[in-house]
Structures are given as structure tokens and as C-alpha cells.
Amino acid sequence: MKSFVQANFVISAEKLSQCPDFQLNEFPLLGRSNVGKSSFINALANNKKLAKTSNTPGKTRLINFFNFSDKFIIADLPGYGYAKVSKEAQNRWQKYLEEYLLNRKQIKSLIQFVDGRHDIQKNDYQMREWTETYNLPIFTVVTKMDYVPKSKVLNVIKKIEQEFGGEVYPFSTVDKRYNEKILEKLM
């Protein structure tokens, strides 16, 4: 990991009108609850306490912005799928997140997270179809690769490349060798 990358939390926003006015490329993180988005932020920042991690799905409720050395912005979004909130709250999130994803000018590319230990889930496919419907730029990060046997790593990546197309990057909070390529992509 490049040690010069300094990251800091900037602000949380519920909707587009509350988002900060940056002129840096922004990368929103899409993925199911507990897929490892916060751990990804912490690993890139080399700071275990920057983004709050939890074993309870659905803890992220706002768009959380992180500035990486004034080079790029990561926007951590609420996970899709399981969350113990009302239907009304889920509908509000969906409306606000769609507005943000479709209208935020700073977005360079979306990053969709998929858990490497499991097959691609139905809601992962649904999210990918939604991004394709609006022709949004996107690439995939496969998390939790430290749990995948080394002999199966290539198969996991190839399968996701076949299903989703585009660029696919393996990621691990334990095996940091994967992370350098992701950082280069974001820079």
C-alpha cells in the first residue's frame, strides 16, 4: 500500500442536495450489507477506525464521504438487501440514492462489491441491471478473498467477469497485495 495516501471522513449526507461540493473524482460504493465496503475504505486508508464496521447489517444509513489525499473521494452508501428498517425508510433511501447516483456530476465510476465466498446474489444482479439501464460506469471489487482457497481465486474472478463483464478486482483486508491495483485505478 502506498503510505502517502491520507484519508479522512468529510461529511454524511442523506440526499443529493446535502452532498459536499468537491471537484475530485468520486467513487460510490454499492453492495449488500456486510459485503465489506467499510473494511475496503479502512484498508485503502490504512486506518482500521476510519469507517465504522459492524457485524450487524444495515448500520450505514447515510452517504458517507471520505477524502483520499485530495486525489479522489469515496462515497460509502447504505448496503442493499438486509436492513432492520421500515419499508418507508427503505423507500426513502432508494429515492435519495437514485437521485444521487443519477445526478451527481462528480461520480467517475460506481464500484459494486460482491462477496467472493458466495455466488452472486439476486440483489447484486438487480443492482447491476439498474446501473446498466442508466449506462452508468461501473467496475467490480470481489471482497473477502482471504477466505477463498488460493486454488479457487482465479475461478471466482473469472466467473464474476463472465456474469458482469468489465473490470473485476479481487480485494482482501488481510492479503494487501490485491489492493495496490485498486488504488492505481482510483488515482
Image (cartoon, rainbow, N blue to C red):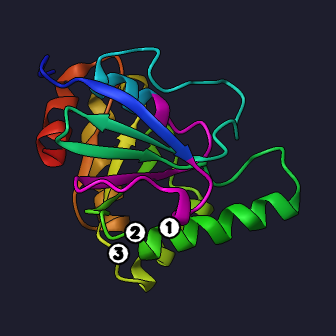
User: Residue 17, can we see it?
Assistant: yes
The reply to whether discs 1 and 2 touch (Cβ–Cβ < 8 Å) is yes
Can you tell which of label 3 and label 2 is closer to the viewer? 2
Tag 1, which secondary structure?
helix
- Camera-side residue of 17 and 160: 17
Q: Which residue is mark 2?
A: 104
Q: Residues within 10 Å of mark 2 (few under 14, many from 20)?
A: some
184 vs 24: above or below? above
- Camera-side residue of 67 and 141: 67
Mark 3 vs 2, N-terminal side: 2
Residue 4 shown left or right of residue 163 in the figure: left
Residue 165 shown left or right of residue 20 in the figure: left
Residue 171 rendering spot, x and y as whole percentages = 31, 34
Give residue 100's mark: 1
The amino acid type found where label 1 is placed reads: Tyr
Can you tell which of label 3 and label 1 is closer to the viewer? 1
Image quarter for residue 59? Answer: top right
Q: Which residue is mark 3?
A: 136
Give residue 27's mark: none
Image: magenta residue range = 13-38
Magenta-drawn stretch contains 28: yes
The amino acid type found where label 3 is placed reads: Leu
Q: Residues within 10 Å of mark 1 (few under 14, many from 20)?
A: some
Residue at horizontal 33 percent and vertical 23 percent from the top: 43
Residue at horizontal 51 percent and vertical 55 percent from the top: 120
150 vs 119: above or below? above
How far apart marks 1 and 2 lie (CA) works out to 5 Å
Residue 112 rendering spot, x and y as whole percentages = 41, 55
Mark 3 vs 1, N-terminal side: 1
Tag 3, which secondary structure?
loop
